[in-house]
Amino acid sequence: MIRRGQRRTTDSGQEIGLPASPGLAPRTEQLRRLGLGDLAAAGVECPSTVACESIPAPYQHLEGKDYGNHDVADRPASQKVDYIVVHDTEGTWETTIKLVKDPTYVSWNYTIRSGDGHIAQHVPTKDVAWHAGNWYVNSKSVGIEHEGFLAQPDAWYTEEMYRTSARLVRYLAEKLRIPLDRQHILGHDNVPGTTPATIRGMHTDPGPYWDWAHYFELLGRPFYTSASLFSGMVTIAPDYTSNKPVYTGCAKPGEKCAPHGSGAVRLHTAPRADAPLVKDVGLRPDGSPSTTDVNDTGARASTGQQFAVADRQGGWTAIWYLGQKAWFEDPWWDPKAVGAHGKLVTPREGLTEIPVYGRAYPEAEAYPAGVPVQAVTPLPYKLLAGQAYVLGATSPSEYLWATTFEPAGHKVIRGEDVYYEIQFGHRVAFVKASDVRVRPSNW
C-alpha cells in the first residue's frame, strides 16, 4: 500500500493522502531483533507482516454440558473450514483478553486490538472455537474478534485494525482455501439462528457502521459491477461516506445516532421512503414492525451481499428478502447497488413453498448408533414459488458430535442430503438442494 500510495476520505469528511514510494523495500533483517522472525515458532498462525502473539484459551475439562470452551480437532482433515466470521468485542482489549482466559467463558480464534492492529491468537485454526452462536457454523469457521463497540465506530474501527485484519483474513483464506466473498466472509450479524427459539438472541456485530467496502478493497476483492443495470441480481454497494441512513439507540434507546457513513441500506414494503419497513417474523413473531435501532437487523441489507431482483420502479429496486419483496432507494444518480450475475435458487416445479434452515444437518438415517439424532428444524420463514435467492455455496450435510473436548469423543456425521447456502435476509440461511432448482441470474 505504501509503494502504491493511497487516498481516503475519513468518516468526518477529511481528505488524507499517503504519497507513493515505489522503491520502498522492507528491512527484513530487523524481524528477529523485534521477535517477529518466526511466527510459527511463537505458536501463532499469522502472516509475517503483522505483530502477533499467542494468548491461549484455556484447555480445561469442566463438568456438565459446557465441558470446556473449545474443541480440539484436526481441521481441515476432519471438517473443511468454509467461513471466517468477523466480530466486534463490545468491550475493551483488556476485558476481552480477561474473558478469553476464563475457562468457563466461550472462545474465539483471534482478537485484534483497535489502537495498533496487534493480533492475539487464542485457538488454533485446526480446532473448533465456540464463537458464532451456531454449532454448525462454529464447526466450519474461524472467528476473529475486533476490539470495539458497533455504536462507536470512529473511536474503535481504526484503519490500523482494518488493515491488520485484512492481512490476517487474506492469509487464512489462502491457508484454508476459503473464497473471499460475502458468502464466506461473514459478520457475526450474518450468522443465522439455529432454530426459531434462538433467532432473537443472535448477535448484531460488527453492525451497520463496519466498512465492508473498504475491508474488501484491502482484501484485494473490491465489489464492482459485473452485469448491466437491468440484471436479475444485484450486489449491495452504497457509497459508505455519503450513505447515512438514520439509526437510533447508539447512546440511548430511541435516541437518534449521530449521522455517520454506513454500508447498509434500509428495506421498505413499498417504493417510498415513508413506507413501513419490512418485517422479520423470526425476530418478531407477533408481527410488529422492524425499527431503525442500530442493533435491529430485520430490514437491512449490507455491502457485498447479493440478492435476486424482484422488481424495479422509478429510483427504487426490490429484492427478494425473507420471503417478501423488500424495496430500497436506488436512483441512477446515487446508486446503492450494482449489477451482478451468478446463480439463483427457486423452489422446484410443483412446490409452492419450501422450508429454510439455520444449519445444514444430516437426515436421521445418517446417524450411527449412540449418536443422538439432531432435529432438522426449519426456521419460521418460507421460500415461496416465484421467488429467488442468490446461491452462495454448496454445503454438505454435517454434524460434529462432541461431548468432551478431546477428539477421541468426537464424530463427524455426514449425510446424503446436500444444502445450498443462500442470502435470505441480512443473515444467510440454508435450503435443501432437493427442494430447489438452480438457474442463472440472467434467465
Image: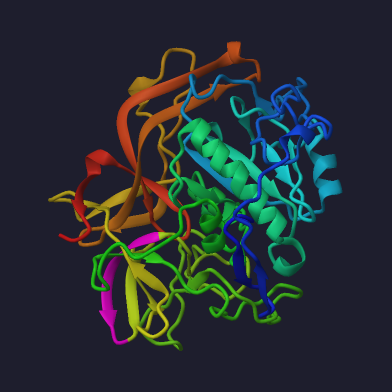
Q: Is residue 80 above or below residue 228?
A: above
The answer to whether residue 355 is left or right of residue 87 is left
Question: Which residue sits at x=71%, y=30%?
Answer: 69
Q: Nearer the viewer, residue 120 or 196?
A: 120
The answer to whether residue 347 is left or right of residue 291 is left
Q: Is residue 173 above or below residue 281?
A: above
**Snapshot quadrant of residue 255:** bottom right
Residue 133: in sight, yes or no?
Answer: no
Q: Is residue 109 above or below residue 427?
A: above
Place of residue 80 in the rendered image (x, y in percent of width and height, measured from the top left): 46, 28
**Snapshot quadrant of residue 189:** bottom right
Question: Which residue sits at x=28%, y=83%?
Answer: 313
Q: Is residue 291 above or below residue 33?
A: below
Q: Per the image, is 311 magenta?
A: yes
Question: Over which residues does the magenta segment extend?
Answer: 306-314
The answer to whether residue 45 is left or right of residue 193 is right
Question: Which residue sits at x=69%, y=39%?
Answer: 110
The answer to whether residue 331 is left or right of residue 2 is left
Place of residue 171 in the rendered image (x, y in percent of width and height, measured from the top left): 57, 38
Q: Nearer the viewer, residue 283 or 156?
A: 156
